[in-house]
Image: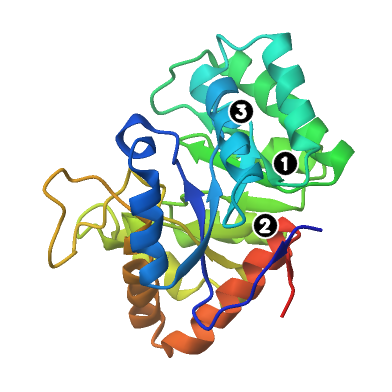
Amino acid sequence: MPKIQSYNNKLIDIGLNLTHPSLIDRYESIINDAYDVGVNYFILTGSDYNSSVESYNLAKNNKLFFSTAGIHPHYADTYNNNDFRIIEELSSENKVVAVGECGLDFHRNLSSKINQINCLQAHLVLANEINKPLFLHQRDAHMELYENLIDFKVNKGVLHSFTEDKNIMRQYLDLNLYIGITGWLCDPQRGQELREAVKYLPIESLLVETDAPYLLPKDLAIKPKDRINLPQFLPHIVQRIAEIKKIEIEPLVSQIYRNTLNCFGLTDDA
């Protein structure tokens, strides 16, 4: 199992798109700024062939980084067998801790539904074969995703960047999956259903992420001029969760840390 060093502040950003053009050229300063506020480790999201390879290359050379490898549903029409062969090879690497980002997105429908489903199922088979968790994306496709997870007996992974209501959340929790919470929680308008759901989310099933550079928390007192989200804002999201759930921040952070280790098969060498 990959090991991480224990720190007093044990925040891990489980969803960081560090290979995005808005971040990659200044990633060292971005990571230093996050580290200074207690975000100690980062799971870099692979969402297509290129970002999966690039995320892994960053992770294998930096002790603070881990990565995922997968094909986002937006790219289900265009990926090929060779692309997925590389995803399979990457997924077996020690520093790659999850299969995905994969899933279904019937909101934008940038790929056909049948190709999205076929692509998703390839990831489900792979994750089961190598016994690694899934990093799942879902938008306007809950029932189709849920049924596939049941059919393939999936019970290991996280619903990345969850944005929906408590009833949908409970169905994923029934599959023993974790729920990833982002700055969507901090959106005064769009985040209302999620804030209500978080009240009922057991802290034992909670993970946190920024999904940077996306989903900048809209209730930040001082926002970056470029409106780009950064991993240094992860503590703000955790604080909002603590306020909504009316619990102390320190035990919440400790529990989220343990959840992250459990979900991604990491060990604490403290």
| Rendered position, 163 above or below 99 | below
Give the number of the disc on residue 177.
2
Q: Nearer the viewer, residue 225 or 78?
A: 225
Quadrant of the snapshot with the N terminus: bottom right
- Cβ atoms at labels 1 and 2 below 8 Å apart: yes
Q: Secondary structure at mark 3?
A: helix
**Which residue bears the numbered disc 1?**
149
Q: Nearer the viewer, residue 207 or 113?
A: 207
User: At x 74% / y 74%, what residue is drawn?
Assistant: 269
Q: Nearer the viewer, mark 1 or mark 2?
A: 2
**Which residue bears the numbered disc 3?**
53
User: At x 34% / y 52%, what residue is drawn?
Assistant: 29
- Cβ atoms at labels 1 and 3 below 8 Å apart: no
User: At x 63% / y 41%, what residue is drawn?
Assistant: 68
Label 3 sits on what residue type?
Answer: Val
Residue 3: x and y in percent read 73, 64
Residue 119: x and y in percent read 66, 21
In the drawing, does residue 117 fall left or right of residue 224?
right
Q: Nearer the viewer, mark 3 or mark 2?
A: 3
| Rendered position, 174 above or below 115 | below
